Amino acid sequence: MQELPIELPAAWKFFSSPVNLEKITPQHMGFQITSGVPKEMYPGQIISYKVSPVPGIKTSWVTEITHVEENKFFVDEQRFGPYSMWHHEHHFEEREGSVLMTDKVSYKIPLGFLGRLAHFLFVKKQLRSIFEYRIEVLEKKFER
């Protein structure tokens, strides 16, 4: 959850553009969109990326925008990638002179016991650090 000192339309414009995802992802992850990206997000939109979750290992990730309610929320779900399941909700709530942004992420790691071990050893920590990085970048970008 993060409150940003911007108006709702500006927040929506920034966060609903997949191009801006690269700007709020740590550089060491080598995040790169490999599909074309339309100017406006829509349900059914497929976006493919290359990302390096572990240094030196690039993987493909394909997500679908499954739900969009302009200026309120959108959902992206993994169709192909490193997780068995990935469901990411982005919610926006207008406040007086600001926007409260809330991310809800549900995911499942593949590989049974090995996946659970990887989750314990580094996946959970890495996901937390990605979202902490985003908070820092967004605070700088949208400072009062």
Image (cartoon, grey):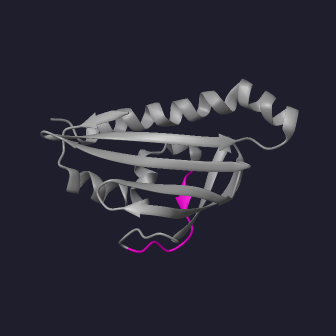
User: What residue is rendered at 71% in x and 45% in y?
Assistant: 56
Q: Is 11 above or below relative to 66?
A: above
Q: Which of the two residues, 72 or 143, is positioned nearer the viewer here?
A: 72
User: What residue is rendered at 13% in x and 39% in y?
Assistant: 96
Image coords of residue 16 (percent x, y): 37, 59
Image coords of residue 34 (percent x, y): 57, 68
Q: Is residue 39 left or right of residue 80?
A: left
Q: Quadrant of residue 144?
A: top left
Q: Quadrant of residue 1?
A: top left
Magenta span: helix, strand or loop, mainly?
loop
Q: Is residue 6 left or right of residue 112?
A: left
In reply to whether residue 36 is colored magenta, the answer given is: yes
User: What residue is rendered at 80% in x and 28% in y?
Assistant: 117
Decide if residue 106 is in sight here.
Answer: yes
User: What residue is rendered at 54% in x and 30% in y?
Assistant: 128
Decide if residue 17 is in sight here.
Answer: no
In reply to whether residue 33 is colored magenta, the answer given is: yes
Q: Is residue 48 left or right of residue 36?
A: right
Q: Which of the two residues, 24 or 5, is positioned nearer the viewer here?
A: 5
Q: Which of the two residues, 73 or 132, is positioned nearer the viewer here?
A: 73
Q: Which of the two residues, 52 or 78, is positioned nearer the viewer here?
A: 78
Image coords of residue 76 (percent x, y): 52, 56
Q: How many marks?
A: 0
Residues in magenta?
A: 30-38
Q: Is residue 19 left or right of residue 83?
A: left
Image coords of residue 27 (percent x, y): 50, 44
Q: Quadrant of residue 134?
A: top left
Q: Is 26 above or below relative to 8?
A: above
Q: Is 76 above or below relative to 1?
A: below
